[in-house]
C-alpha cells in the first residue's frame, strides 16, 4: 500500500545511533509536504546534520520507519536508492566539491550522472554559474575559490537539476549577508516552482527572511515543532509495506 | 537580481549511463595510472612465454608420442654373422607381408656401427663383440601392445633370436617428464592469472581509497554502483590495453628468440616442439584474457566496496 502522494517525507519514530553509543536522534516523527519551505534549527550538536543525512539517504536509521516519495526507503533494495537520490539536491555543510573538477564540471555533475547530454547541459550550467555570480570562474578549481565561492558552487550543484526536494546544511554559513539573501531567494524561487526545501541553520535572521516557512527545532536529538511544521500527526507505517 | 535559470526537466529520472571521457574525468589519471600498465605488461609477457612453452611442450609430446607409438625396433642378437643376417632377412620378409606393418627396413651394418661408435670406438671387431642386426618397423597408426606381441610370436619361428621393442617403452620416462613440464607451464599460467587479478584488486582498492570522497559525492548525487564501477573499469581497461600490448610484443620477441636458439640445436626431438599458426593465435589472445580478467576484477572489487555504502 502506498502513502498518499501529498506526503513527500514521512519519519515515524526514527532513532539513530552510531555503534553502541547513545542515540543521537530519538523518536523523530514528522511529515513533510511538497512545496513547503522548512527550516531545521537547533544548537550545534543537536543532531541537525544527522537528521539531514537520513533525509538525503546517506544513512539508515537504527530504528523506525522512513517513507520518501511514497516509498518505504528502509526496506528498499539499495540498487533502487540512486533513483530517489536523484530527486533530491543536497548542499553539504563542507560543500564536498570534487577537487580536480572545475566549477563548471562540479555544477554539471548531477546532470551528467543523470544522463543529460553535453549539448543540453552547457546552457543551464552557464546560466547557473552566472546567477551565483561565478560566470568568470567557470574553469576555476575549488582550491582556488574562496569559501563563499565554493559554497555558491555547492548550492548551484544542488539546484541545477530542479530537484523535488532540496536539503541544505548551513548553506549560508560562509557567505556575506547580501549573498546569503540572494541564495535564500533562489531557494524560495525553487520552492515556488514546487520544490520542497529543507534548510538546516541556526541563523534566526535567515529564518525571518522567509515568512511562510515552517520551523522544526532539534534539541538534544528530539524534535520540537514551534511553528506547527509537524502539525500533521504522522500516521504509523503499516507493517509489511 | 536575475531570475534563477530555468532548468527544464531534462534530467532523466531513470538510470542513464554515465560513461566516456566525462565519467573517466572524475578520477584523476595521476592517482590511478602509476605502475599498473607496467605490472600488466610484465604479467602478459611472462604469460605469453609460459603459454608458448606449454604449447611447444604439448606439440612435442603429441608428435613424439605419435611417432613412437607407431615405431618398433627388431633386434637379432646372434654371435654368428651369417645366422644373424639370414634371420634378419627372414624377419624382414615376414614383417613386410604383415598388414600391421607400414614399412620395414634393415639397418645396414655400417650404420649400426656408426651408431655404436661413440660407445665402442672405431673399428670394433665383430668377433670381439657381436653387433645385433637392427630392423626398423613403421606400424599402422593405433597399433597396440597386442599387435607387437603377435608380431613377436610370428617371428619366433623364422627368426628365433629376434627381439621386438616398442620405441615408446624406452622414451616413456622422457615423455612423462615433458608432460609434467607442460602441466607445470599451464599451472604457471593459472598462477599468473591469479597474481594479475590480485594486482588489479590491490590497485582498484588503492584507487577507491584515494578517490573515496569523489565516489561518495557521485554516490550521493544519485550515481549508481554500475556507473561508478564503469569509471574504474574504463581506467583499468586503458591501463590493461597499454600493458597488454607491450607485454604481447615483449613476449613474442622472447618466444621468437628462444625458437631461434632451439632451432640451432637441430635436434629431432626439439624440432617437434615448434608452434603452429593456431598456437600463435592463442598467444595473441593472452592480452585479451588479461584485459578481461583486469576489467572484471576491477568491477567486482569496486562493486564489493560500494555495497558497504548505503
Image: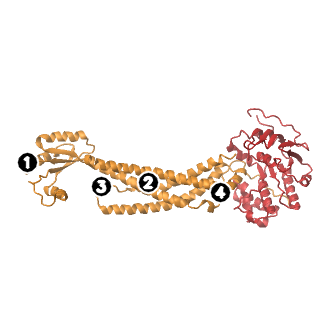
Chain colours: A red, B orange
**Pair 4/2: label in front:** 4
Dot 2 or dot 3, earlier in sequence: 3
Q: Which residue is at a point 77% across and 49% down the rendered structure image?
A: A88
Instruction: Find disc 1 in the rendering and name its residue.
Output: B83
Mark 4 / mark 3, whichever is N-terminal: 4
Q: Residue furthest top?
A: A239
Residue B30, percent across and down?
62, 63
Q: Position of residue B119 (x, y in %)?
A: 19, 57
Image mark for residue B210: 4
Q: Is residue B7 left or right of residue A231?
A: left
Q: Which mark is residue A27?
A: none
Q: Which residue is mark 3?
A: B269
Q: Is residue B281 in view? A: no
> Do we see residue B106 in this rendering?
yes
Q: On what subunit does the disc labeled 3 rest?
A: B
* Quarter placement of the C terminus of chain B: top right
Residue B149 coordinates in the image, percent (x, y): 20, 40
Mark 4 and mark 3, same subunit? yes
CA distance separating discs 4 and 3: 54 Å
Res B25 → quadrant: bottom right
Distance Cα–Cα, label 2 vs label 3: 23 Å
Residue A62 lies left or right of residue B193; in this view the side is right
Query: Which residue bears the numbered disc 2?
Result: B282
Label 4 or label 1, whichever comes before in sequence order:
1
In front of the other: B259 or A118: B259
Amino acid at each position: 500500500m502506498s502513502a498518499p502522494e501529498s506526503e513527500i517525507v514521512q519519519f515515524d519514530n526514527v532513532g539513530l545511533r552510531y555503534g553502541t553509543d547513545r542515540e543521537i536522534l530519538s523518536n523523530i516523527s514528522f511529515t513533510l509536504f511538497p512545496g513547503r519551505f522548512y527550516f531545521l534549527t537547533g544548537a550545534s550538536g543537536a543532531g541537525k546534520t544527522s537528521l539531514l543525512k537520513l533525509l538525503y539517504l546517506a544513512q539508515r536509521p537504527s530504528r523506525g520507519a522512513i517513507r520518501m516519495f511514497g516509498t518505504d526507503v528502509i526496506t528498499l533494495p539499495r540498487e533502487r536508492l540512486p533513483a530517489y537520490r536523484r530527486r533530491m539536491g543536497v548542499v553539504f555543510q563542507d560543500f564536498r566539491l570534487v577537487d580536480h573538477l572545475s566549477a563548471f564540471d562540479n555544477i554539471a555533475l548531477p546532470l551528467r550522472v543523470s544522463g543529460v547530454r553535453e549539448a543540453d547541459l552547457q546552457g543551464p550550467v552557464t546560466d547557473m554559474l552566472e546567477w551565483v555570480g561565478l560566470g568568470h570562474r567557470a574553469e576555476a578549481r575549488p582550491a582556488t575559490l574562496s569559501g563563499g565561492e565554493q559554497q555558491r558552487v555547492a548550492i548551484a550543484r544542488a539546484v541545477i537539476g530542479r530537484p523535488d526536494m532540496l536539503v541544505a546544511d548551513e548553506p549560508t554559513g560562509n557567505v556575506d549577508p547580501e549573498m546569503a539573501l540572494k541564495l535564500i531567494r533562489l531557494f524560495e524561487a525553487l520552492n515556488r516552482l514546487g520544490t520542497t526545501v529543507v534548510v538546516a541553520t541556526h541563523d534566526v535572521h535567515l529564518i525571518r527572511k522567509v515568512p511562510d516557512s515552517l520551523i522544526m527545532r532539534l534539541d538534544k536529538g528530539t524534535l520540537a515543532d514551534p511553528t506547527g511544521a509537524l502539525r500533521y500527526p504522522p500516521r504509523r507505517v503499516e507493517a509489511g509495506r | 537580481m536575475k531570475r534563477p535559470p530555468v532548468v527544464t526537466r531534462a534530467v532523466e529520472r531513470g538510470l542513464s549511463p554515465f560513461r566516456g571521457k566525462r565519467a573517466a574525468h572524475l578520477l584523476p589519471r595521476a592517482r590511478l595510472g602509476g605502475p599498473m600498465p607496467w605490472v600488466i605488461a610484465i604479467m602478459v609477457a611472462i604469460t605469453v612465454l609460459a603459454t608458448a612453452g606449454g604449447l611447444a611442450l604439448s606439440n612435442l609430446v603429441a608428435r613424439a608420442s605419435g611417432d613412437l607409438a607407431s615405431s618398433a625396433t627388431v633386434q637379432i642378437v646372434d654371435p654368428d654373422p651369417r645366422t644373424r643376417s639370414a634371420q634378419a632377412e627372414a624377419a624382414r620378409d615376414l614383417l613386410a607381408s604383415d598388414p600391421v606393418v607400414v614399412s620395414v627396413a634393415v639397418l645396414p651394418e655400417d650404420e649400426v656401427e656408426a651408431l655404436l661408435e661413440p660407445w665402442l670406438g672405431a673399428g670394433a671387431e665383430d668377433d670381439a663383440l657381436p653387433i645385433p642386426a637392427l630392423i626398423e618397423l613403421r606400424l599402422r597408426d593405433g597399433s597396440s601392445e597386442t599387435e607387437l606381441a603377435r608380431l613377436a610370436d610370428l617371428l619366433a619361428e623364422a627368426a628365433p633370436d629376434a627381439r621386438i621393442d616398442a620405441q615408446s617403452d624406452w622414451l616413456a620416462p622422457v615423455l612423462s617428464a615433458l608432460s609434467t613440464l607442460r602441466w607445470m607451464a599451464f599451472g604457471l599460467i593459472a598462477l599468473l592469472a591469479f597474481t594479475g587479478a590480485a594486482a588489479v584488486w590491490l590497485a582498484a582498492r588503492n584507487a577507491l581509497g584515494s578517490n573515496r570522497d569523489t565516489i561518495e559525492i557521485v554516490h550521493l548525487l544519485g550515481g549508481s554502483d554500475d556507473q561508478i564501477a564503469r569509471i574504474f573499469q574504463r581506467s583499468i581497461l586503458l591501463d590493461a590495453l597499454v600493458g597488454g600490448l607491450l607485454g604481447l610484443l615483449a613476449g613474442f620477441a622472447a618466444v621468437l628468440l628462444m625458437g631461434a636458439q632451439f632451432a640451432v640445436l637441430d635436434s629431432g626431438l626439439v624440432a617437434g616442439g615448434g608452434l603452429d599458426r593456431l598456437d600463435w593465435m592463442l598467444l595473441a589472445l593472452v592480452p585479451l584474457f588479461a584485459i578481461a580478467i583486469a576489467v572484471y576484477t576491477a568491477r567486482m572489487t569496486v562493486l564489493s566496496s560500494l555495497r558497504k555504502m548505503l
